Amino acid sequence: MKQWVTFILGFLSFLAVALMILIIILGNKPFSAVEKQAIDRVESEELIAEVDRAYVYSNSQTSVTVIGTDLEGKAKAAFVPSGDGEIEAIDLEDKVTAKEAREIALKEMDVKDILHTKLGMETEGPVWEIAFINKEDQLNYVYILAKDGTWWKRILNL
């Protein structure tokens, strides 16, 4: 009897882990497909030759930010809108870096954990979105303009 209970508990544990892995993989599949399409589009238009990273950035319109280097070796970012919109590409050489944006944004904040730092295109131009949890376990978003490092918007204590 004890062996059957051990077997059933082991089987259920294995099944739970397998289901969690399946859910994670299937849950990320739409993002992965959109990111792959954006990378292919940027490479086919020869805006970026070597891709470092790509991620989905959401504002009023969802887009994919592709960061890498062009044929000349200069750091670039391309913002690929969902659908057939026009791609916007910028040089990152004279822009605020992700590290600098985090330092600017978090200088005055009580940060417990940084969730992400993403570059995206807004109405004001390229911005760094820094999402973090503060000491009171509240979600915060801070937006820093990439052109000069000034504050654009803060969404605090969610």
Image: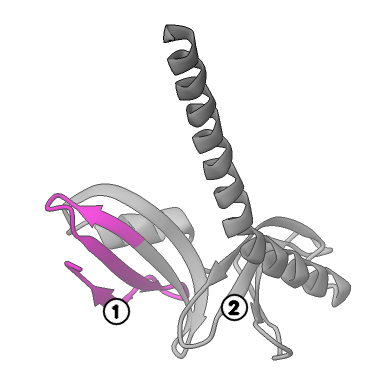
Question: Tell me, what colour scheme is on the image?
Answer: one colour
- Residue 97 percent location from the top left of the image: 48, 60
Q: Nearer the viewer, residue 22 or 152?
A: 22
Q: Indicate whether residue 107 is drawn in magenta.
A: no
Q: Earlier in the sequence, mark 2 or mark 1?
A: 2
Q: Tell me which amino acid carries mark 1.
A: Lys
At 25% from the left and 54% from the top, the residue drawn is 133
Whether residue 47 can be seen here: no
- Residue 106 percent location from the top left of the image: 26, 57
- Residue 50 percent location from the top left of the image: 78, 57
Magenta residues? Answer: 131-158
Q: Tell me which amino acid carries mark 2.
A: Ser
At 49% from the left and 30% from the top, the residue drawn is 12
Q: Which residue is mark 2?
A: 63
At 62% from the left and 50% from the top, the residue drawn is 25
Quadrant of the snapshot with the C terminus? bottom left
Q: Which mark is residue 16?
A: none
Quadrant of the snapshot with the N terminus? top left
- Residue 126 percent location from the top left of the image: 50, 78
Query: Above or below — where is 48 with respect to 79?
Result: above
Task: Answer with left or right where residue 47 lies relative to residue 7.
Answer: right
Please, what secondary structure does the residue beneath circle 1 have? strand
Q: Indicate whether residue 138 is drawn in magenta.
A: yes
Q: Which residue is mark 1?
A: 153
At 56% from the left and 49% from the top, the residue drawn is 24
